[in-house]
């Protein structure tokens, strides 16, 4: 008799074994392609920050990182600009259990350089080296898998070129960096920078991370101005971050933390998003639930052109799954962000269901001992989400595809000329590297409601 799916997958009774290494190699000047090893689900740690949580040091960040690893996540995204994020992530990865069970070569660390504070950037060679050295220390590691130049639209092309060249010098001379990319918001700027770097250096970028450009509200990243242009510039992988549009696509609206209302979305767009949330409520759904599944599931195929064949997180504790188990093709790479264990568990259940719906998902589910109709359930859920997504996009009207200015008109880089080994936490603005669905709730009633979200 077939078993039915359970809400929370159970762990194995046996003790975990030492996890296998990601198959990276560098020999005779040839490096493993990033797109063959980067996992398609990346754990973003921008939530380990004062902008998302009043006291990130009081969070169970070690528990979150450990749980992410046990669920199969093998890549973590951070930045010096994210307050104490690098330190908290580094400390979590340095615990005896993690070090013994998950050797450094079994997961990837992605960080950034260049952004100091909300209005201060330094892409100079000196600061790039200083920032990389500090990240290595904070993260307790001898190497960084991928380093991005952070939010390149705020500086000149010449500054970006200087920083990329310096990162490559560090890569080639010291070996403490493996892959190099850029991140930012305006797609035209990202395309310009990627083309310029290829033209000026003869070497393409390994990765370009875009945020809030493939969501329920804006899918420009999937079009010719986005992933196709980046691919033409030789970019290997294009991760999609901020799948809730920096918190715009939530029932409770944009997050307002200690910095107040920082979100760039205009009032007209916020109003139609509220209407869309009410629309979802009328069908027994929540806007953020639909938005998360839509973005993760759709980007798997829409982002495959610059995707990866790295092993996906299985979503089941201590259950390893290879790319071959889910069809053997490239999957679009997404960055998620959470602050609490229940959020991570829900996200992994959604991710597991999405994987069940891929080519070969039916056979994989049976082999793994899951419900023999998980593939069918996943496909039906995909259709239901797509129907609601189309309804939401109709309601957005002119707000569908809207992109806010970045930087704001009149922006001036307040770069200081003095050395700044600096506390980058001071004065930083909310960064968009992870999805703000993880903003902490403030009362027991809200916690109860959060835990009752449909797990889909």
Image: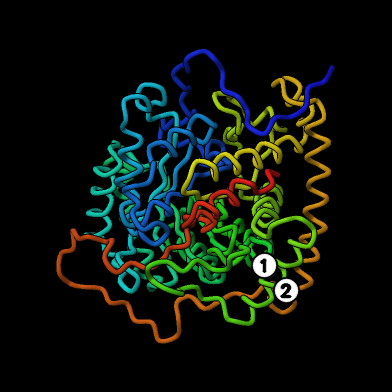
Q: Residue drawn 61% across and 56% down?
A: 231
- Crowd class of label 1 (few under 14; some 14 to 19; many from 20; radius 10 Å): many
- Closer to the chain start, of discs 2 and 1, is 1
In the rendered view, tell whether residue 272 sits above or below residue 300.
below
Residue 322 figure quarter: top right
Residue 409 point in image, percent of width and height: 45, 85
Residue 149 point in image, percent of width and height: 39, 59
In the image, taking residue 308 as reference, residue 16 lies left or right, namely: left
Whether residue 204 is visible here, answered yes or no, is no
Can you identify the residue that label 2 sits on? 396
Residue 126 figure quarter: bottom left
In the rendered view, tell whether residue 392 sits above or below residue 362.
below
In the rendered view, tell whether residue 338 sits above or below residue 245.
above
Residue furthest to the front in view is 445
Q: Are marks 2 and 1 in contact (CB under 8 Å)?
A: yes
Residue furthest to the left in view is 418
Q: Residue drawn 30% across and 71% down?
A: 120
Closer to us: 412 or 338: 338
In the image, taking residue 140 as reference, residue 395 lies left or right, namely: right
How has the structure been colored for display? rainbow
Q: Residue drawn 26% across and 54% down?
A: 131
Residue furthest to the top in view is 14
Whether residue 52 is visible here, answered yes or no, is yes
Can you identify the residue that label 1 sits on? 217
Closer to us: 370 or 5: 5
Closer to us: 106 or 272: 272
Label 1 SS: loop
Residue 34 point in image, percent of width and height: 51, 41
Quadrant, the C terminus: top right
Quadrant, the N terminus: top right
Residue 417 point in image, percent of width and height: 18, 72
């Amino acid at each position: 008799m077939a078993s039915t799916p359970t809400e929370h997958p159970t762990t194995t009774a046996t003790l975990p074994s030492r996890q296998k290494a990601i198959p990276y190699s560098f020999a005779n000047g040839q490096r493993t392609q990033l797109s063959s090893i980067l996992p398609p689900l990346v754990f973003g740690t921008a939530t380990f920050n004062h902008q998302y949580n009043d006291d990130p040091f009081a969070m169970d960040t070690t528990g979150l990182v450990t749980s992410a690893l046990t669920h199969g996540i093998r890549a973590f995204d951070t930045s010096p600009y994210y307050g104490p994020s690098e330190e908290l992530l580094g400390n979590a990865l340095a615990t005896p259990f993690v070090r013994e069970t998950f050797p450094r070569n079994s997961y990837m660390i992605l960080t950034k350089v260049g952004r100091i504070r909300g209005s201060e950037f330094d892409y100079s060679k000196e600061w790039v080296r200083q920032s990389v050295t500090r990240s290595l220390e904070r993260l307790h590691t001898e190497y960084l898998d991928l380093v991005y130049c952070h939010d390149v639209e705020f500086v000149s092309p010449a500054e970006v070129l200087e920083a990329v060249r310096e990162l490559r010098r560090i890569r080639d001379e010291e070996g403490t960096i493996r892959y190099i990319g850029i991140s930012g918001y305006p797609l035209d700027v990202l395309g310009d920078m990627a083309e310029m770097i290829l033209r000026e250096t003869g070497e393409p970028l390994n990765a370009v991370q875009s945020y809030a450009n493939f969501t329920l509200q804006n899918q420009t990243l999937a079009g010719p101005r986005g992933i196709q242009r980046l691919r033409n510039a030789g970019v290997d992988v294009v991760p999609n971050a901020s799948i809730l549009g920096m918190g715009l696509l939530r029932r409770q609206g944009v997050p307002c933390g200690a910095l107040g209302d920082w979100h760039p979305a205009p009032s007209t767009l916020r109003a139609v998003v509220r209407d869309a949330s009410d629309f979802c409520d009328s069908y027994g759904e929540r806007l953020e639930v639909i938005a998360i599944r839509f973005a993760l599931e759709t980007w798997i195929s829409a982002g495959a052109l610059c995707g990866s064949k790295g092993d996906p997180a299985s979503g089941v504790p201590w259950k390893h799954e290879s790319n071959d188990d889910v069809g053997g093709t490239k999957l679009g790479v997404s960055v998620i962000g959470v602050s609490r264990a229940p959020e991570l568990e829900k996200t992994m259940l959604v991710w597991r269901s999405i994987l069940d719906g891929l080519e070969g998902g039916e056979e994989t589910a049976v082999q793994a001992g899951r419900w023999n109709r998980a593939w069918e359930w996943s496909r039906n859920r995909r259709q239901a989400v797509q129907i609601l997504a189309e309804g939401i996009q109709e309601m957005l009207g002119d707000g569908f595809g809207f992109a806010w200015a970045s930087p704001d008109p009149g922006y001036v880089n307040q770069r200081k000329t003095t050395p700044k080994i600096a506390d980058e936490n001071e004065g930083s603005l909310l960064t968009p590297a992870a999805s703000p669905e993880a903003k902490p709730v403030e009362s027991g009633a809200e916690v109860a409601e959060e835990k009752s979200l449909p797990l889909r």
